[in-house]
């Protein structure tokens, strides 16, 4: 888990969570690129979701973390970036499943509804969980087929 390059973004409602998570992850030895308003000014969450999504899709960051009020808007916007599999998670179980079964490359977290201690646990679980592959690999390939405009039912392996 150490030494990952991460893109982290948030809107004004996620700014405090971003600041906390970035400081913590840097202490753990991760490199972070931050896309969030430093001054807490109101901003539009799709802008940060796009920036983080592009960084992950381009390989400039291994993973992305996004924070807004509910996490929902960030998740919707990030999933519009080709190559992104963003997951809205709200506990350690959904964090683990989004990585192990869905190979999510961006995690979206509610800054308003989830306490900072649980955010830390979610981030730790999400970053340490590996993708299982196997039958889940076939399912991820089907998601990629849909993204490319192809029929996922043609993917059998």
Image: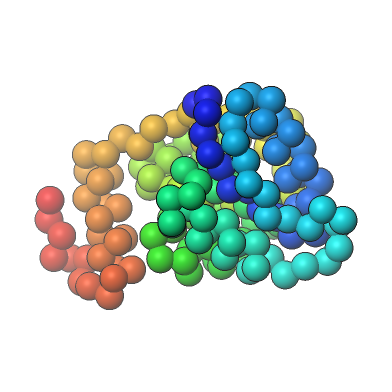
Q: Nearer the viewer, residue 92 or 2?
A: 2
Identify which residue is drawn at 53% across, 39% down: 5
Residue 133 in the figure: left or right of residue 86: left
Residue 69 visible from this viewpoint:
no
Residue 51 visible from this viewpoint:
yes
Furthest residue to the bottom?
Answer: 149
Q: Looking at the image, how many numbered discs can be counted on the residues? A: 0
Can you give x and y, in whole percent of width and height, for residue 155 in the image? 15, 60
Q: Nearer the viewer, residue 102 or 10?
A: 10
Q: Say which quarter of the image contains residue 124.
A: top right
Residue 139 in the figure: left or right of residue 50: left
Q: Nearer the viewer, residue 10 or 154?
A: 10
Q: Say which quarter of the image contains residue 12.
A: bottom right
Q: Say which quarter of the image contains residue 26.
A: top right
Q: Nearer the viewer, residue 132 or 54?
A: 54
Can you give x and y, in whole percent of width and height, for residue 58 in the image? 43, 56
Identify which residue is drawn at 71% across, 30% down: 24
100 lies above or below 113: above
Residue 106 in the figure: left or right of residue 26: left
Identify which residue is drawn at 12% across, 51% down: 157
Identify which residue is drawn at 29% across, 70% down: 148
100 lies above or below 67: above
135 lies above or below 121: below
Can you give x and y, in whole percent of width and height, for residue 7 in the image? 58, 48
Scheme of image coloration? rainbow
């Amino acid at each position: 888990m150490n030494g990952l390059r991460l893109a982290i973004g948030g809107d004004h409602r996620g700014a405090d969570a971003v600041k906390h998570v970035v400081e913590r992850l840097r202490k753990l030895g991760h490199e972070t690129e931050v896309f969030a308003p430093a001054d807490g000014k109101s901003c539009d969450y799709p802008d940060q979701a796009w920036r983080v999504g592009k960084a992950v899709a381009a390989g400039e960051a291994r993973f992305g973390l996004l924070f807004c009020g509910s996490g929902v808007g960030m998740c919707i916007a990030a999933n519009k970036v080709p190559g992104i599999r963003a997951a809205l998670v709200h506990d350690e179980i959904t964090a683990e499943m989004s990585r192990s079964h869905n190979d999510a490359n961006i995690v979206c977290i509610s800054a308003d509804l989830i306490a900072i201690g649980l955010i830390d646990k979610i981030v730790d679980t999400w970053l340490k969980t590996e993708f299982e592959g196997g039958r889940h690999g076939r399912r991820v390939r089907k998601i990629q087929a849909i993204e490319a405009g192809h029929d996922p039912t043609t993917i059998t392996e």
